[in-house]
Amino acid sequence: MTTPEEVFAGGVAVITGAGAGIGEGLALHAALRLGMTVAVADVDGSAAERVAARITADGGRALAHAVDVRDPAAMERLAERVAAGAGPVRLLVNNAGVEQFGYLWDTPVANWHRLVDINVNGVFHGLRAFLPRMIANPGRSVVLNMSSVGGVAAVPLQAAYVMSKHAVLALTESLHLELAAVGANVGAHAVLPGVVASDIFASARGVDGGDTGAAERARDGRAPGARDHPGGGRRGDLRPGGPRRVLRPHPARGRAAGDGGPGRAAGEPGGTAPAPQPLPPGRRMTHLRGGYRRRCGSPCR
């Protein structure tokens, strides 16, 4: 079985949102464990430089790039700089993302557009800038798009964020089929992390914490005289007022050969990056769920 080191060693990785959190961890892993040259991209240039310096100090290869994924022209310039200065990209990780916590009807319009622009449009801009070159390169390459366990569930007080992660998952599933249709030697994978210690809530706008109380304080700050919910109980109490249906992830049905297994993405220990294959006759959809691929013979729900 091919190891991640054999697939990626000596190649170039581009990771957005790599100045902190999951992105920083992936940059360190790609550089120091897989032996890749890493383009550490982040809207915070000083954070990107800090991570790149840490990689270099530990014997790895990295370059820092200050880039805003909301800007398609900036992403195209990044792709050009990486191609000219480091070579063909073997691993693209569209990781940059932000949170928005609180009631959907209280979400400021500017916050909604900011979240969609980063979490969804940012992924599209990364794909559009880098994929043509990756497809043209005959060597094996892999795209990882950062979704979330929230991409297969419904979560109260995180509607905007969860919506964006559903979108990233659907985009990746469709991209997988398109790459297979043209015979590209590029793998497309959605990564669905669980709870991870990071500063994503600290960077969220409109609410200063990750709990119902914080959402209440933000709401009450805008509407001091607001009353309790008509269904009983106070706002933020999700129990009174009748049952609430929360969608749960659909159980995976079988693992495709070459997939890394639950929680493992291409490039992680135990995971591999198989070439995309056309769907057999009668198979209509491909679902990526935490490393699993489920292929349905009938329209999937």
Image: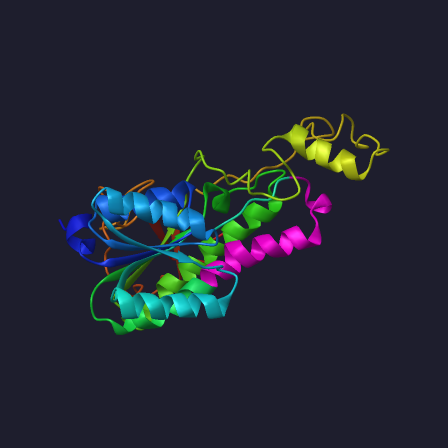
The percent coordinates of residue 186 (x first, y second) are: 28, 64
Q: Residue 239 lies in magenta, yes or no?
A: no
In which image quadrant can residue 210 be found? Answer: top right
Q: Residue at 41% across / 44% down in the picture? A: 192
Q: Residue 117 lies in magenta, yes or no?
A: yes
- Please indicate whether residue 167 sits to the left or right of residue 196 in the image: right
- Please indicate whether residue 26 sits to the left or right of residue 243 in the image: left
* Of residues 231 and 83, the one drawn nearer to the viewer in this rendering: 83
Q: What secondary structure characterizes most of the magenta part? A: helix
The percent coordinates of residue 222 (x first, y second) are: 79, 39
Residue 290 visible within the image? no
Describe the colour scheme in one phrase. Answer: rainbow
As displayed, is residue 223 above or below residue 67?
above
Residue 30 visible within the image? yes
* Of residues 15 and 238, the one drawn nearer to the viewer in this rendering: 15
How many callouts does the rendering have?
Answer: 0
Q: Residue at 64% across / 53% down in the picture? A: 112
The percent coordinates of residue 34 (x first, y second) are: 21, 48
Q: Residue at 48% across / 45% down in the picture? A: 152
- Please indicate whether residue 231 sits to the left or right of residue 62 in the image: right
* Of residues 150 and 27, the one drawn nearer to the viewer in this rendering: 27
Q: Which residues are magenta?
A: 102-124
The percent coordinates of residue 191 (x first, y second) are: 38, 48
As displayed, is residue 155 above or below residue 92?
above
